[in-house]
């Protein structure tokens, strides 16, 4: 059975839009686990645009499955990871201007920085995955750097607009997954996967884990909106048992 890592960054995006206390990603993690998530994934970005340090520390206490921390190879975030000790680290590229992670980490071009980060994290006993494009040279480098797993960036697949492009991208993911298995690296996949495009992905032989965020949080907004409006109508009614006295 392929594991599902649920990325809850966008629950925090909504909270940070108002610098408010809700919705709390810690509560989202509890519900995601009740729904069957095999792990909870969060990206602590250097600009703290969504997930905050407080979230990561609390999630470490509350997550009952596995906590996967996505992060850049930055000294500041590595220091936090070494305190939190998540079950898995996924090293990702990070640019301040981007809307979301673009492309995989180029570990061939940035071999020294990646090696140093992997060594420091693995010295603390952490399990390290590298988010890379489905490219054989990147995979061979992941092996040389002693990564435990790789996560293939599926953006090119999920953004493909023609059947021919989809077929090309799927073939790359298939070849890369087979190569990862030969190298003894656990193949994970993620980015832009949704309820429609996930089917061909789960048919790729040997995939161990998918990390999915945006489409799940998007569906949660609509799946819960009707009930949320009903609840507000109820809260507005005279007979609603208020828990806090009106001022
Ligand atoms: N995997 C990695 C490494 C990511 O950076 C992201 C996005 O934060 C995801 C998976 C999830 O992507 P999406 O939100 O598009 O499902």
Image: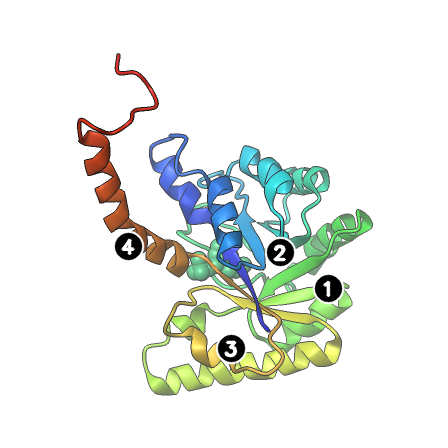
Q: Which residue is mark 4?
A: 222
Residue at 55 percent of width and 43 percent of height = 44
Q: Secondary structure at mark 3?
A: helix
Judged from this view, the residue extending furthest toward the top is 247
Residue 73 lies, in percent from the top left, at: 64, 49
Q: Secondary structure at mark 4?
A: helix
Q: Which residue is mark 3?
A: 202
Mark 1 to mark 2: distance in Å?
10 Å
Q: Looking at the image, which is closer to me, 93 or 188?
A: 188
Query: In the figure, 207 relative to 147: above or below?
Result: below
Q: Is mark 4 within 8 Å of ligand 1?
A: no
Query: In the figure, 232 relative to 9: above or below?
Result: above
Badges 3 and 2: C-beta atoms under 8 Å apart? no
Q: Which residue is mark 1?
A: 148
Quadrant, the C terminus: top left
Q: Dot 1: few (<14), some (14–19), or many (≥20) neighbours within 10 Å?
A: many
Residue at 56 percent of width and 83 percent of height = 174
Q: Is residue 117 left or right of residue 59?
A: right
Mark 3 to mark 2: distance in Å?
21 Å
Q: Is mark 2 within 8 Å of ligand 1?
A: yes
Mark 1 to mark 3: distance in Å?
21 Å
């Amino acid at each position: 059975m392929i594991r599902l890592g649920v990325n809850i960054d966008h629950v925090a995006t909504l909270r940070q839009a108002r610098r408010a206390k809700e919705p709390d990603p810690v509560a989202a993690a509890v519900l995601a686990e009740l729904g069957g998530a095999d792990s909870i994934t969060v990206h602590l970005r250097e600009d703290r645009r969504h997930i905050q340090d407080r979230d990561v520390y609390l999630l470490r206490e509350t997550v009952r499955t596995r906590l996967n921390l996505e992060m850049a190879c930055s000294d500041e975030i590595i220091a936090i990871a070494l305190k939190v000790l998540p079950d898995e680290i996924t090293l990702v590229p990070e640019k301040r201007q981007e809307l979301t992670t673009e492309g995989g980490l180029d570990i061939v071009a940035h071999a020294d920085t990646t090696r140093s980060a992997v060594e420091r994290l693995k010295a603390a006993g952490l399990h390290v995955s590298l988010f890379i494009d489905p490219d054989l040279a990147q995979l061979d480098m992941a092996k040389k750097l002693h990564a435990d797993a790789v996560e293939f960036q599926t953006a090119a697949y999920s953004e493909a607009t023609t059947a021919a492009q989809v077929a090309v991208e799927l073939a790359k993911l298939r070849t890369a997954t087979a190569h990862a298995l030969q190298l003894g690296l656990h193949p994970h996949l993620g980015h832009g996967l949704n309820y429609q495009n996930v089917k061909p992905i789960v048919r790729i032989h040997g995939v161990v884990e998918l990390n999915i965020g945006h489409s799940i949080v998007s569906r949660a907004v609509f799946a819960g909106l009707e009930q949320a409006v009903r609840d507000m109508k109820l809260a507005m009614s005279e007979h609603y048992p208020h828990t806090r006295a009106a001022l």
